[in-house]
Amino acid sequence: MRNRIRKGIKLLNKELGKDWIDRIDVSEISEKFSCQCIAGQLYRGHSQMQKALNLSDEDRYEYGFFIEDMNDLPSGNKRQERWAESTKMWKEEISKLKKGFQLFKGI
């Protein structure tokens, strides 16, 4: 999952420039409210982000913006656990970037 999130960060850098990170409030990132996730903070929601970046459903998964592989949809607690894990990783990666760490070549 972390590799997909890092791939998503690279995509956002490419599409929005590196200053997109300044628009994210890490303390507000939440899997419970779509307006507070990465897509919500940058685009007002997943469908708007998907359209703006021309992403398929599979792309959203591959770039770490969505936890479910459309061919392997979890339910119940497993789904909640995946969202919590994804949220935690996005917070960690963005916090590192905000602190000035260079996680990838070219960031």
Image (cartoon, grey):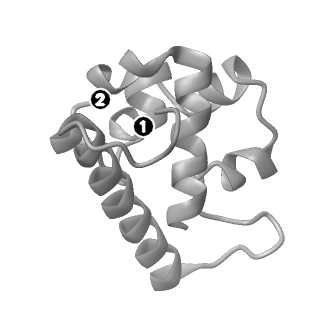
Tell me which amino acid carries mark 1. Ile
Q: Using the rendered image of the protein, determine whether residue 21 is visible from the camera's viewpoint.
A: yes
Q: Where is 44 relative to 72, above or below?
A: above
Judge from the rendering whether residue 94 lies leftward or rightward of residue 1; answer left or right: left
Name above or below for residue 96 compared with residue 35. below
The answer to whether residue 82 is left or right of residue 52 is: left
Q: Could you say whether the residue bearing mark 1 is in a helix, strand or loop?
A: helix
Q: Residues under labels 1 and 2: Cα distance?
A: 7 Å
Q: Picture coordinates of residue 59 (x, y %)?
A: 76, 46
Label 1 crowd (10 A; few <14 / some 14-19 / many >=20): many
The picture quadrant where one finds residue 18 is top left
Kindly identify the residue that appears in the image at 62 percent across and 33 percent down: 11
x 29%, y 52%: residue: 91
Q: Residues within 10 Å of mark 2 (few under 14, many from 20)?
A: many
Tag 2, which secondary structure?
A: loop
Q: Is residue 71 above or below residue 60?
A: below
Q: From the viewer's perspective, is 26 left or right of 93?
A: left
Residue at which label 1 appears = 38
Q: Are marks 1 and 2 in contact (CB under 8 Å)?
A: yes
Amino acid at circle 2: Ile
The numbered disc on residue 68 is none
Residue found at x 61% / y 23%: 14
Mark 2, residue position = 24
Question: Quarter of the image containing the N terminus?
Answer: bottom right
Q: Position of residue 102 (x, y in %)?
A: 35, 42
Q: Residue furthest front?
A: 105
Q: Nearer the viewer, residue 18 or 47?
A: 18
Image location of residue 28, percent across then percent down: 21, 40
Q: Is residue 65 visible?
A: no
Position in image of residue 83 (x %, y %):
44, 65
